[in-house]
Amino acid sequence: MDHHDIKPEEMSWFEKPGSIKLMWIILIGLCVLSAVAGVVASFMHLMHPYTIADKFPVFYGVYGFAAFMFIVLAGQHLRKILMRDEDYYDTAQERMTREEIEDAATQEEGNQ
């Protein structure tokens, strides 16, 4: 998004470039902290894995990311199957072309 057309005093805190950079730093820091906590908990034997995959220190992060990617990619293909034309629910009158609408408007003006 281009912020050049918005005055700085009109921007909210979330739109300011410095705030956006700070939010990214906080997000990345929390992700790293979460991964480090998982690794530490794994090495200190605080986690009790139920399956072999659970023994991988950042298993839940990788699993969550893979599930997210599956949902996004499946949604893209599902859209191709379920997508309808823009005017799918329009009636015949609503499907009139611009010229037909203008002609109808000029005819109504002539009748009045």
Image (cartoon, rainbow, N blue to C red):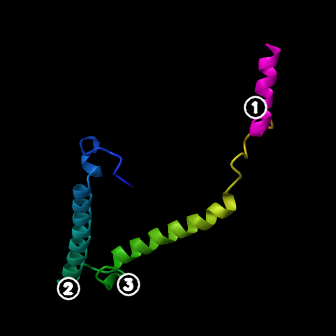
Q: Earlier in the sequence, mark 2 or mark 3?
A: 2
Q: Is residue 21 left or right of residue 1?
A: left
Tell us which disc is closer to us: 3 or 1.
1
24, above or below 58, in the image: above
Q: Is residue 52 left or right of residue 26?
A: right
Q: Quadrant of residue 39?
A: bottom left
> Badge 2, how many Cα within 10 Å: few under 14, some, many 20+?
few
> Badge 3, how many Cα within 10 Å: few under 14, some, many 20+?
few
Q: Are marks 3 and 1 in contact (CB under 8 Å)?
A: no
Q: Relative to the observer, which residue lies in front, 104 or 27?
A: 104
Q: Is residue 61 left or right of residue 30?
A: right
| Residue 108 included in the magenta stretch of the image | yes
> Badge 1, how many Cα within 10 Å: few under 14, some, many 20+?
few
Q: Please give the residue where the numbered disc 2 appears in the rendered image.
A: 43
Q: Are marks 1 and 2 in contact (CB under 8 Å)?
A: no
Q: Relative to the observer, which residue lies in front, 106 or 72?
A: 106
Q: Residue furthest top?
A: 112
- The label shown at residue 59 is none
| Residue 25 included in the magenta stretch of the image | no
Q: Quadrant of residue 29?
A: bottom left
Q: Which residues are magenta?
A: 94-112
Q: Please give the residue where the numbered disc 3 appears in the rendered image.
A: 53
Q: Please give the residue where the numbered disc 1 appears in the rendered image.
A: 102
Measured from the top left, where is residue 6 in percent x and y? 33, 45
Q: Quadrant of residue 52?
A: bottom left
Name the residue type under label 3. Ala
Please identify the quadrant where the N terminus is shown.
Answer: bottom left
Measured from the top left, where is residue 90 in percent x and y? 74, 40
Q: Is residue 88 left or right of residue 18?
A: right
What residue is shown at x 28% (from left), y 41% (from top)? Answer: 10
**Residue 47 visible, this angle:** yes
Q: Relative to the observer, which residue lies in front, 5 or 41?
A: 5
